[in-house]
Image: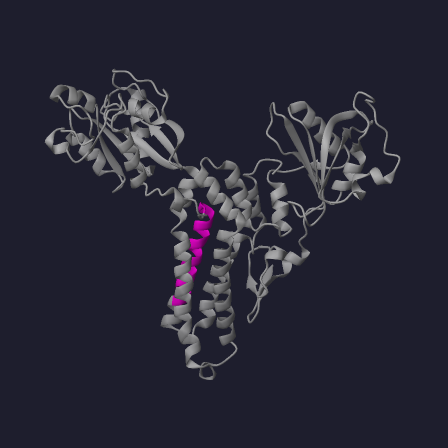
């Protein structure tokens, strides 16, 4: 399967298809001309299961209106007046002849004409619907049974059950969304904070897509110019043509690197920052864990080794989603179960975005503590001198300041009391500062792990192109191979080029009905 862009020979795309409405003029994937959206009409429940006021069943596809003709009966009949409704006597009552973007009250009936539910029917006509196809939504009573009966009526009338994310997948295939915007739909659904929802909303509005389009077009223009040089001998080209290409490549590389720099922020917004509480036994880790959460989540006991597994809980700290983890106390022990907990605790330290290392302020930092912290990632540790209420009690301090007089070698560390909550506000501020969390800055659209991987591949190929053109400008054909690979990676981000495995990977994460 080949793809061709202006000025050059066909380039292999490894089975990639280009979405027709996203295809730039200079890149035409002929396989896309043979590719069409599924001709099936799909149906699914679009609301969460369980008790609710409203349940929505949606249909999309070429037969959506015809199926609605079969199962919808318009008012004015009331359910109490008839439990069995015959087909409409006038074609003017059929959904298929009603105006687009309208809603109508009526009843869904099964194949025997038995009333299933009292509904509002919403009509949408292609291409002005979410999926870009003819679409119908039935808004009926919530709950499990009523929505299932409406769905069953639609399936019996000729629809098939939708696959996860298939409505959004069709929106992509029909040019309503690019792949980055489609992923933003899922991010918005899964958002755990206002900042995450804001970033997803901006991504859905096209902020990230426009930045990626500029990057793609810049690489494409370079490819066209580089391919054009292959048609001329070196002495026929103006000297400035080949000489300018490395600098133009560097401009594109720099733009890609700026986008890649947003990956860490994007990961935190989508997944939450991993903050691990660690330290020796009986330092007050579980007490601090509960205090930060604001409720009793883990068992607190004076016996060492109470916590023997990782305990994770999600919270939002001033707009920043956080995954807070309590761990087993770090010590040498012969207890097999506790040892496994300690092993897991040590492993979690390497994955953490931030470690809160808790020690007893009355005991201080031991040589074992220093050895553990030395093995942690640099710059990701906050040392917390806990139980400061006991220090104040012993030394007569009133605890008004988190800089209370602790042991001299610990004076530079953050002091707090997990038991009383003293110093907790200072700790939260330090956590946010350490994670460089600015909710205003984090509200902008940021790239995902998939975007980052493809951007890194593109940067590598663009850099290789630049190196070839700088060292051996007469090897433009070799440089073009690298540039084509970079363009394909960039195209996969927004879906300008894609393969079925990519779409399956993206949309399989969606719920059915979206």
Residue 505 seen in the figure: no
Q: Residue at (63%, 42%) from the top-left corner?
A: 167
Vertical side of 151 occupied by 300: above or below: above
Image location of residue 204, percent across then percent down: 53, 47
The front one of 74 and 56 is 74
Span of residues in magenta: 448-466
**Quadrant of res 408:** top left
Q: Main secondary structure of the magenta part?
A: helix
User: Where the N terminus falls, by quadrant?
Assistant: bottom right
- Does residue 463 show up magenta in the picture? yes
Q: In which quadrant of the rendered view does residue 368 lie?
A: top left
In the image, taking residue 126 as reference, residue 460 lies left or right, namely: left
Looking at the rendering, in which quadrant would you find the C terminus?
top right
Q: Is residue 338 above or below residue 194?
A: above
Give the image quarter of residue 287.
top left
Is residue 286 or residue 90 the one in the foreground? 90
Residue 489 in the image: state x and y as whole percent.
49, 56
Q: Could you tell me residue 247's position as x and y percent? A: 39, 69
Q: Residue furthest bottom?
A: 235
Residue found at x 39% / y 60%: 254
- Which residue of the protein is positioned furthest toward the right in this rendering? 89
């Amino acid at each position: 399967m080949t793809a061709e862009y202006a000025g050059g020979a066909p380039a292999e795309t490894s089975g990639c298809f280009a979405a027709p409405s996203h295809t730039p003029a200079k890149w035409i994937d002929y396989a896309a001309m043979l590719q069409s959206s599924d001709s099936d009409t799909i149906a699914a429940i679009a609301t969460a299961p369980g008790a609710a006021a409203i349940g929505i069943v949606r249909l999309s596809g070429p037969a959506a209106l015809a199926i609605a003709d079969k199962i919808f009966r318009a008012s004015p009949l009331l359910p109490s007046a008839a439990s069995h409704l015959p087909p409409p006597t006038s074609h003017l009552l059929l959904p298929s002849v009603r105006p687009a973007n309208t809603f109508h009250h009526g009843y869904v009936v099964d194949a025997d004409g038995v009333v299933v539910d009292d509904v509002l029917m919403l009509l949408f006509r292609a291409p002005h619907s979410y999926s870009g196809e003819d679409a119908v939504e039935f808004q009926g009573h919530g709950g499990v049974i009523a929505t299932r009966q409406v769905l069953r009526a639609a399936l019996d009338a000729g629809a098939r059950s939708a696959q996860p994310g298939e409505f959004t997948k069709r929106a992509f295939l029909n040019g309503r969304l690019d792949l980055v915007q489609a992923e933003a739909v899922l991010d918005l659904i899964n958002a755990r904070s206002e900042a995450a929802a804001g970033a997803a909303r901006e991504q859905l509005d096209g902020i990230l897509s426009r930045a990626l389009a500029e990057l793609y077009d810049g690489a494409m223009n370079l490819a066209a110019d580089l391919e054009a040089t292959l048609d001329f001998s070196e002495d026929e080209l103006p000297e400035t043509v080949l000489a300018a290409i490395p600098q133009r490549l560097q401009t594109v590389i720099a733009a890609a690197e700026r986008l890649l720099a947003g990956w860490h922020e994007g990961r935190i917004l989508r997944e939450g920052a991993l903050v691990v509480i660690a330290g020796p036994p009986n330092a007050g880790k579980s007490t601090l864990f509960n205090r930060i959460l604001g409720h009793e989540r883990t068992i607190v006991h004076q016996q060492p080794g109470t916590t023997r597994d990782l305990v994770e809980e999600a919270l939002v700290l001033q707009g920043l989603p956080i995954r807070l983890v309590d761990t087993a106390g770090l010590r040498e022990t012969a207890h097999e179960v506790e040892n496994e907990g300690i092993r897991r605790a040590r492993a979690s330290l390497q994955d953490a975005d931030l470690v809160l290392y808790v020690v007893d302020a009355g005991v201080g930092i031991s040589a074992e503590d220093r050895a553990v912290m030395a093995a942690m990632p640099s710059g990701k540790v906050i040392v917390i001198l806990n139980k400061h209420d006991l220090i104040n009690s012993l030394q007569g301090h009133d605890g008004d300041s988190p800089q209370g007089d602790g042991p001299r070698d610990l004076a530079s560390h953050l002091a707090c009391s997990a038991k009383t909550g003293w110093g907790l506000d200072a700790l939260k501020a330090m956590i946010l500062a350490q994670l460089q969390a600015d909710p205003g800055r984090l509200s902008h659209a940021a790239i995902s792990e998939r975007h980052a991987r493809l951007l890194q591949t593109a940067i590598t190929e663009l850099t290789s192109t630049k190196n070839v053109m700088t060292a051996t400008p007469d090897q433009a054909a070799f440089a073009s191979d690298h540039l084509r690979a970079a363009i394909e990676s960039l195209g996969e981000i927004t879906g300008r080029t894609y393969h079925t495995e990519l779409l399956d990977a993206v949309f399989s994460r969606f719920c059915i009905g979206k």
